[in-house]
Amino acid sequence: MTPPPPVSAEPEASAPPVVSEPVAEPAAPPDEEYVDLSEWLTARGVSEKERKKLPHVYMSCQPQAVGPEREEALLCHAWESVERGKGTSVVFRTRLRDSIFGVQKGRIVVMLDAIVGVTITDKEDMAQPNIVDLALEVAPDGLSAELTDGAPPLRSCDEALADLGARVKTAQVTAWDRFDLDLTKRACAQRGHYVFRGGRFVRAVATPPRGGTSGP
């Protein structure tokens, strides 16, 4: 039987491990600046009694400079529950609102208030699109604002109005179809070009939807 070859006491030489250069992670974009509406108003001398006059609970607010004097303001977003009917026949919907607030002499000034969407309350499928979507954009100079249809794939006013208008003419029309159509008409009737005048944004050019009604 042939004995095994002797084992060397020294390990065989091996190539040094290859160390890759660390790859720098791309810098994350800065978070948008969000402001607490109540704290912002308090810091500008607005009393608690005055703050309670706010019509909705606002989820988030962002600083906004408006007017020729670049006045301090906040652009705030809110969800508003609306309903129609009685008893077991109540239909619930949610309206999305964008509001621009300022402060003058300790009082809250609503510079602009617009409905920017209508959606089903308590969606079972969160991927389900809203009934209608709009977008509010304030110009960089703070002198004007545009309320337009939301960009694709969001549901535009013309698309929503055509669909709902056809639906209410069928035998299968429901109470919520009519409610959705009314809410959509009111939201879409606000579309247009707004200019800053007298401390507020007022509509200068309207783009009403087919068969629309004015007012929020």
Image (cartoon, helix red, strand yellow):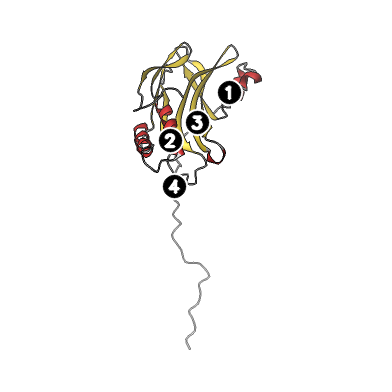
Q: Nearer the viewer, mark 3 or mark 4?
A: 3
Name the foreground residue: 21 vs 115.
115
Q: Amino acid at mark 3?
A: Glu
Tag 2 or tag 3, which sits nearer the N-term? 3
The residue at which mark 1 appears reads as 54
Residue depicted at x 44% and y 43%: 128
Residue depicted at x 50% and y 31%: 32
Residue at mark 1 to residue at mark 2: CA–CA distance: 29 Å
Q: Is residue 195 above or below residue 91?
A: above
The residue at which mark 2 appears reads as 178
The residue at which mark 3 appears reads as 32
Classed neighbour count for the residue bearing mark 3: other residues with Cα under 10 Å, few (<14), some (14–19), many (≥20): few
The residue at which mark 4 appears reads as 21
Tag 2 or tag 1, which sits nearer the N-term? 1
Please say if the residues under marks 4 and 1 sit with CB atoms less than 8 Å apart: no
Q: Nearer the viewer, mark 1 or mark 2?
A: 2
- State the SS at label 4: loop
The mark found on residue 73 in the picture is none
Residue at mark 3 to residue at mark 2: CA–CA distance: 38 Å
Q: Nearer the viewer, mark 3 or mark 1?
A: 1
Q: Amino acid at mark 2?
A: Arg
- State the SS at label 2: helix
Residue 28 visible in rendering:
no
Tag 1 or tag 4, which sits nearer the N-term? 4
Residue placed furthest toward the front: 171
